[in-house]
Amino acid sequence: MTMIFGIPLPALLGQLLIGFINGSFYALLSLGLAVIFGLLRVINFAHGAQYMLGAFTAYLILHYAGLGFWPTLVLAPLIVAFLSAIIERTMLSRLYDLDHLYGLLFTFGLALIIEGTFRYYFGAAGQPYPTPPLLAGGTNLGFMFLPNYRGFVVVASLVACLATWLLIEKTRLGSYLRAATENPQLVQAFGVNVPMLLTLTYALGAGLAALAGVLAAPIYQVSPLMGTNIIIIVFAVVVIGGMGSILGAIVSGYALGILEGLTKVFYPEASNIVVFVIMAIVLMVRPAGLFGKEA
């Protein structure tokens, strides 16, 4: 059997693939954070709660409305995006002209309220969420047995990340969004509804978090604590890629997921801290992050 640094090649390849799957969630979540911070300049601490809310919305739709996985995959992110748009328009928008700390504190408090509410009604234990029958089973890749659903998660994450990047960077709507954050008065003078653009931006970021939550539900179960467990890592990913950098969030998410997987093979004791060690190194070398722009 082929060995690399004393590790069997199939085990190494398997761990690389698992790291890429975890990186799919990191990329999708950090992308939503980067969109909100890059365009609204709001550090959205409620992002983990919106991720959890997406999973719970899917769970409630499945159990009480009887809809299957595929309609739920579309409906849950839209519902969370709509609720987030209401919150942005009625509360968060009043904080844009104040210090960034106010937005951070507001979203942090919002996250505590959402998480506390779901813990009160559902407890801290996870709720099972079934894998769709179409994606049941797995595929033998030779070096590992890959569950079909996890392969779907990788493809769905790649498609969502690419579509978001194209929307922000390559479309007229994206150019309006970027211009509105740089000079809102000028853009509004041309007849563009800037407040609506900002609301749509926040809804988009929240919707991406909710989409990640729906995709994660069959793998990690649905729990009020699921957002808390992952959001700190996602913030580290965003800092490494560069706060507000769309491309940086995507590339760093996948790269750090793979690196975390490799660390579990070669030095398992450091697998829980490797992301934060890299963040510290990157901040010492490039304070704005790998893809960020210096202020």
Image: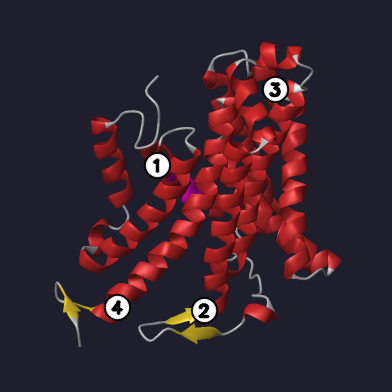
Q: Earlier in the sequence, mark 1 or mark 3?
A: 3
Q: Are marks 4 and 3 in contact (CB under 8 Å)?
A: no
**Numbered circles on residues, count:** 4
- Tell me if mark 2 has few (under 14), some (14-19) or many (20+) residues whose alpha carbon lies within 10 angstroms of its own: some
Quadrant of image for the C terminus: top left
Which residue occupies 74% across, 15% down? 188
Q: Which residues are magenta?
A: 228-232
For marks 4 and 2, the one nearer the N-term is 4
> Residue at point 66% right, 74% down?
130
From the image, tell me which residue sits under label 1. 236
In three-dimensional space, the C-alpha distance between marks 4 and 2, rounded to whole angstroms, equals: 16 Å
Q: Amino acid at mark 4?
A: Ala
Task: Inspect the image, locate mark 1, and give the three-letter code of the amino acid beneath it.
Answer: Ala
Q: In the image, is residue 124 above or below residue 101?
A: below
Q: Does 43 sit left or right of 295 as displayed?
A: right
141 sits to left or right of 93: left
Give the residue type at disc 3. Ser
Taking depth in this image into account, of 189 and 14 the one nearest to the observer is 189
Secondary structure of residue under mark 3: helix
Q: Is residue 102 above or below residue 9?
A: above
* Residue 202 image offset from top left, x and y in percent: 66, 35
Locate residue 83: give its quadrant: top right
> Who is closer to the viewer here, 178 or 12?
178
| Residue where numbered disc 2 is placed | 147
Q: Earlier in the sequence, mark 4 or mark 3?
A: 4
Locate residue 205, reporting x and y percent: 62, 41
Q: Which residue is mark 3?
A: 93
Looking at the rendered structure, the secondary structure element under dot 4 is: helix
Distance of label 1 from label 3 (alpha carbons): 26 Å
Q: Return the disc, 4 or 1, that comes first in the chain's sequence.
A: 4
